[in-house]
Image (tube, rainbow, N blue to C red):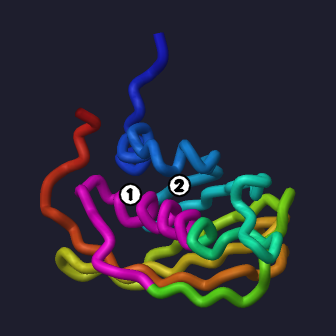
Amino acid sequence: MPEPVTDPALVMWSTDRASALLGMQVVSTGPGVARVSMLVHSGMVNGHDLCHGGLIASLADSAFALACNSHGTVTVAAGFTVDFVAPARLGQTLYADAREVSLRGRSGVYDVTVRADDPESGEVVAEFRGRSRSLGRPITGT
């Protein structure tokens, strides 16, 4: 019998159908941090044969969601900005690394860097800043 998931961010992730539909995978999680990957496939490219910017933003948003829900409280996005700095291409694996910048009361700020091909040294594709708001109730998995 499998052990129950105890990481609150992974409990939230277990029902995230949008991220699953896009083929995203959790690489790692921890308090205030997360890494998520996504392979750019043919259904993700735009009219310039580059990965659609909205899908890059979705990857960053999913890593942000894991990081801000890692403390065990249901937390949602209050808003975000994203700056695209290089294109992502068909066949590349993108890695989004989220990290907590500030958490005070029910509000948080998180930065996410999206890199292509290598999570440590790959070319930076986008920089994302997310603002979170806790709803003040625990993540239960039900």
The structure residue drawn at horizontal position 16% and vertical position 63%, both measured from the top left corner, is 135
Furthest toward the top, the residue is 1
Image quarter of residue 125: bottom right
- Residue pointed to by mark 2: 29
State the residue in front, 85 or 72: 85
For the view shown, which residue lies furthest in the front direction? 47
* Secondary structure of residue under mark 2: strand
- Viewer-proximal residue, 27 or 124? 124
Give the Cα distance between marks 2 and 1.
8 Å
In this picture, which residue range is highlighted in magenta? 57-80
Which structural element holds mark 1?
loop
Location of residue 101 in the rendering, given as x and y in whole percent from the top left corner: 44, 83
Query: Residue 68 location, x and y as percent?
Result: 37, 66
Q: In screen coordinates, is 118 left or right of 63?
A: right
Q: Of label 2 and label 1, which has the lower sequence position?
A: 2
Q: Are marks 2 and 1 in contact (CB under 8 Å)?
A: yes
Q: Does the magenta portion include 92?
A: no
Q: Position of residue 137 (x, y in %)?
A: 14, 54
Horizontal and vertical percent position of residue 31: 43, 61
State the residue at coordinates (54%, 61%).
Answer: 34
Q: Tell which of 105 and 90 is nearer to you.
A: 90
**Corner quadrant of residue 86:** bottom right
Q: Residue 60's image quarter?
A: bottom right
Q: Which residue is mark 1?
A: 70
Q: Which class describes the residues within 10 Å of circle 2: few (<14), some (14-19), or many (20+)? A: many
How many badges with numbers are in the image? 2
Mark 1 neighbour density, 10 Å: few (under 14) some (14–19) many (20 or more): many
Question: Quarter holding the C terminus?
Answer: top left
Q: Amino acid at mark 2?
A: Thr
Is 46 positioned to the left or the right of 118 in the image? left
